[in-house]
Image (cartoon, grey):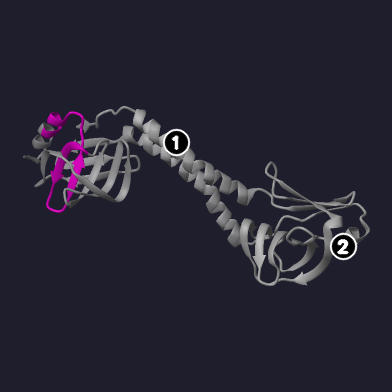
Amino acid sequence: MLFRPPKLRRSLQFAVGLPLTAVVLLPTLFAAWIVWAPQGVDLHIANGVLRVTTGPAPFSRVRTIDLSSVTKVEETHVGKGHRVAGTALPGYCAGNYRYPDLGSVWVATDCSRDVVVLRLANAKPVLLTPPDRQAFLDALKSGREMHQTQSPPQTGIGWFAVKLLILLAPLTTLLLPVIFLVAPGRLRYHLEPGTLAVTTMLRTRRFAIAGATARPHRLKVGIKLWGTAAPGYYTGLFRADGANTKIYATSAKEGVLIKGADFRVFINPEKQVEFLEAYRSLGGAVA
């Protein structure tokens, strides 16, 4: 015999589920875009100005440096620095960093330690790793036009695996609207001779009703131990009435508590009286 939980108004589920999905989905999409978008550094010298373009379109950032403000150019090997603000991906570092031997700097590099340092009159030093270093230094000195693009980083299998995991995050987020809007409608209670089968979104669980007592009950839920607790969809193990209780309901307030020798199960069939009558007829006890 098949029983369903009461149909709930979807207003609360929409009001909570959709905004929560957006709040979680947007950052995960941005994170996936950050690691999968081609990262590079573009260096362009023309008309006495060095333009350094970092990041992928459409969020590329351009820094313009007047070559007349460059007081010193040097090649050096820097120690280990740390990011203050900006991007730090394998083979691509851009933004504000700090190094023990240089202090605060602005970098647009391939994250290697051998860099070109531009010391400026009125700003923090700039660290670069031009692909053709000598051509870049000559262009700085002569002021002639030059254009170089740092190649995308070549990363190993480990970083590729991390990128795949980050790519899966937005897909996982899409489970939220499923939990809020689809899963409650999949909840079913099947009474069979000697057995209660509870069907949720993902699986069916069976409980022997021989020797188990069912009764109407108002549940006092404490905390969720594992499972799902969303408006209109409660499944899993909870601490309720001071005892571990498995809940499979669209409302964790009023329903039917089934207590056996080694389990407590709470459900909320819409036709509660008919459910208890069927439960008794199929071998269960009703209090």
Using residue 201 as the reference point, say whether residue 4 is left or right of it: left
Look at the image and say whether residue 194 sits in the magenta stretch: no
Using residue 141 as the reference point, say whether residue 267 is left or right of it: left
Mark on residue 19? Answer: 1
Return the disc, 2 or 1, that comes first in the chain's sequence: 1
**Residue at coordinates 64% horizontally, 62% vertically from top-left?**
156
Q: Which residue is mark 2?
A: 137
Q: Quadrant of residue 102?
A: bottom right
> In the image, what residue type sits under mark 2?
Leu
> In the image, what residue type sits under mark 1?
Pro
Quick one: SS at disc 1? helix
Q: Nearer the viewer, residue 233 or 16?
A: 16
Q: CA distance from mark 2 to mark 1?
A: 52 Å
User: For the residue carrying disc 1, how many other residues have a C-alpha within 10 Å: few (<14), some (14-19), or many (20+)?
Assistant: few
Q: Position of residue 34 (x, y in %)?
A: 62, 49
Q: Position of residue 232 (x, y in %)?
A: 30, 35
